[in-house]
Amino acid sequence: MSIGILTSGGDCPGLNAVIRGAVMKGDKIYEQEFAGIRDGWRGLIVDDVFSLPRRRVRGLSKEGGTILGTSRTHPYNGIDGVGGPDAIRAVMERHGMEGIIAIGGEGTLSGAARLAADGLPIVGVPKTIDNDLSGTDYTFGFDTAVSIATESIDRLRTTTEAHHRCMVVEVMGRHVGWIALHAGLASGAHAILIPEVSVTLEQITEWVLLTQARGRAPVVVVSEGFQLKNDKGELEDIAAERGLDAAGRPRLGGIGEALAPLIERSTGIETRAATLGHLQRGGVPTAYDRVLATRFGHAAIDAVMQRKWGQMVALSGIDIVTVPMAEATKELKTVPRKQWDEAAVLFG
Ligand code: F6P
């Protein structure tokens, strides 16, 4: 009998460290065998599974990406009409899998919670660079993303200062502003714009002009999910600046590119935009993320051996605990207004 491991959703530095942690401890302490499932739920639906011995995970904690591959296949929507608990159970039985460790973000883990409620033996491991999963203080990948964003903003600042410009830096964060808040604070940004807080163009203009008046080159950090609103809290129509996606809708990302000309017009300061995008998810994880991911891997195999199906490993203070996956995926962990207010004291 073996334990299957899959990684699903957007990748994240530290995924390989979780896999290594689970396999190494599982092999050494529990003499457990493992199966790698390729490309998330896809591998469990189309039967793409391979043996994952301990020697295969050696040295992996510093590797970015995931040796298992990933996809956004939904376990219930499936592929070409095949999917759902029965299809997955059939593949598990064929490979003698008695449990699954599913490593993923909110989408993956809500699917995993539903499968567990339908009787499948699954333990979850939270991952996302966005740090927006409830039930855990931090997710691995976040520290790496913040470090990359901070270094990038530091670098952008020197060219911005040399040209007496304003720079708008767009970081990831589709629904929440954790990366923007932390990278913005770490790099001394003059404004941090996040999806959780309404800010008008007038307010941004004031911060940018105040910064310039002090002889500094303004740096504005914005989450990709930020939406510009007017003072009544209504959405500003900036679709034209933002550009359209392949389906003809205003792009979600692209807020940095859209804001730059608006700020240039309202302040008279030459303004450029830089979008960090997938750079924030690439390359080696930081030491912090390697440690957290390894601890999550250890805790995941412990949870499997204790048959804690439907539970997710999580960080609580300095301890690794387990929490119900269904609870953790009920709502996203957003930035509390108080934390943004504390940062905003330094804007302008
Ligand atoms: O959920 C993590 C995340 O990095 C988001 O911040 C971002 O919107 C999204 O993934 C990008 O996903 P993709 O790699 O599919 O473009």
Image (cartoon, grey):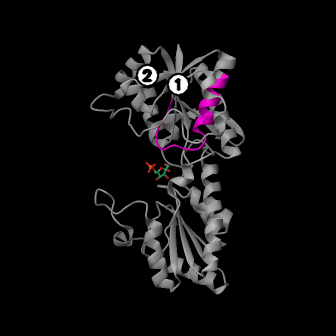
Which residue type carries mark 2? Gly
Across and down, in percent, residue 136 comes to 60, 42
Left or right of 219 in this view: 39: left
Q: Residue 145, labelled with which disc?
A: none
Residue 25 vs residue 202, the one in the foreground: 25
Callouts 2 and 1 close, C-beta under 8 Å:
no
Q: Indicate which disc residue 309 carries.
A: 1
Which residues are the magenta region? Answer: 6-25
Q: Secondary structure at mark 1?
A: loop
* Identity, as a three-letter code, of the amino acid under mark 1: Trp
Crowding near pointer 1: few (<14 within 10 Å), some, many (20+)?
many
- Is residue 175 one of those drawn in magenta? no
The circle drawn on residue 119 is 2
Q: Is residue 133 visible?
A: yes
Question: Residue visible at 45% across and 23% down?
Answer: 49
Whether ligand 1 has any atom under 8 Å from the Cβ at mark 1 is answered as no
Residue 275 picture location, percent across and down? 50, 63
What SS does tag 2 mark? Answer: loop
Give the x, y percent position of residue 176: 51, 56
Q: Quadrant of residue 305?
A: top right
